[in-house]
Amino acid sequence: MTVNRGNAMNIDSSIYVVGENTLIGVAIHRALERAGYCKTFSEKGEDLKNVSQIDRLFRERKPEFVFLAAGKTGGIAANIKYPADLMLDNLLIACNIIECARRYNVKKLLYLASSCSYPRDCAQPMKEEALLTGLLEPTNVAYAVAKIAGIKLCQAYKSQYGSNFIVGIPANAFGPGDDFSEEDSHVVAALIRKMHEAKVNDRKQVEVWGTGNPQREFIFVDDLADACLFIMDNYDTPEPINLGSGMAFSIRDLAEAIREVVGFNGSIVYDTSKPDGMPIKSLDNSKIRDLGWSPYFSLREGLAITYNWYRKEY
Ligand code: GDP
């Protein structure tokens, strides 16, 4: 029986997860399948930056619900090296998908922004109201501006057309399927790879970038996907909502935790010639917690699952 819960997804709703290969896109698919949603799809080779291809996809597949989890991302090094690529990719995809979602009367769209959209010197933990109250972190300003444009576009469509487009702001996600490349990876994947390689090659030390003092909030990607499904069903307000785990750690503590999970016995050295980026990124998660959602995985569990996946894949 199909149960109708107002704006909530039904088991046979047509659901489009934009971003077939992204860490979070793949995890949202997994979560939807696990929950029994039977009409979910992603693009099949369509170029998300090509508006006519996206228009045709919406016209033919008629999605009722859209999870917008696409757009190039990268760690601190990628943000410094390819700011134009990151910005353009995210801007074009947000414009194309959001406009097509309006044109084809999508019932609800969830846009995933990023915690780097918050000001560099934001009071911690960062509340949703703090967006656009200060200057951005210079190492990721181009990507952050693109993400803020996506947030504002959703709100503008809500205000002008009444579109039910909501915005989630995730903490730093990690998990199976992450980008483990040397240049582009985020810190969790980078340190898993570095420590694993040091272990198997019997190297005595591993280099961690920066001072080790910055703090980040990490969320295991299956928890993030679960939070996305939860707000798709339970949140209808144009103001963004933070999607965090409450697990904020210094890079130093993270490196120690990864060392234990990987079983690397050498030492950790800090390369202070590399940038720290934002000093602290920790989200105020009271909004989603008050709605009744909380994460399932601890940092340690998430790291162990991710490391097992990495060992099998590489
Ligand atoms: P950010 O959250 O946008 O800064 O992205 P990252 O995940 O790339 O980096 C988080 C923090 O981890 C920064 O302070 C980095 O300097 C630090 N870090 C330490 N070692 C590494 C590494 O090997 N790769 C990356 N990407 N970050 C590292």
Image (cartoon, rainbow, N blue to C red):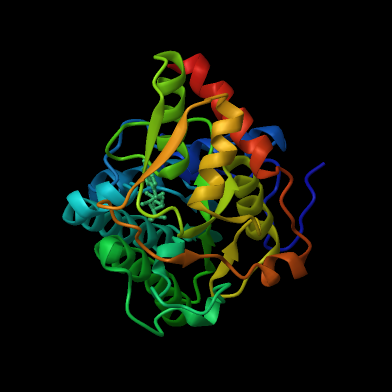
The percent coordinates of residue 11 (x first, y second) are 70, 42
Could you say where residue 255 lies in the image, as x and y percent from the top left? 51, 41
Which quadrant is home to the C terminus? Answer: top left
Image coordinates for residue 35, horizontal then vertical, percent: 72, 38
Residue depicted at x 40% and y 78%: 156
Instruction: Depth check: give the residue in front, 85 or 151.
Output: 85
Could you tell me which residue is drawn at 39 percent across and 20 percent down?
203
Visible residue check, residue 224: yes
Check the picture and name the quadrant holding the N terminus: top right
Residue 152 in the figure: left or right of residue 234: left
Q: Quadrant of residue 193?
A: top left
Task: Residue 120: name its quadrant.
Answer: bottom left
Q: Residue at x 58, y 22 (%)?
A: 308
Position of 263 with respect to 301 (left or right) is left
Q: How many marks?
A: 0
**Residue lying furthest bottom:** 133
| Residue 40 or residue 74, whichever sits in front | 74
Residue 28 in sight: no
Identify which residue is drawn at 53% across, 31% down.
176
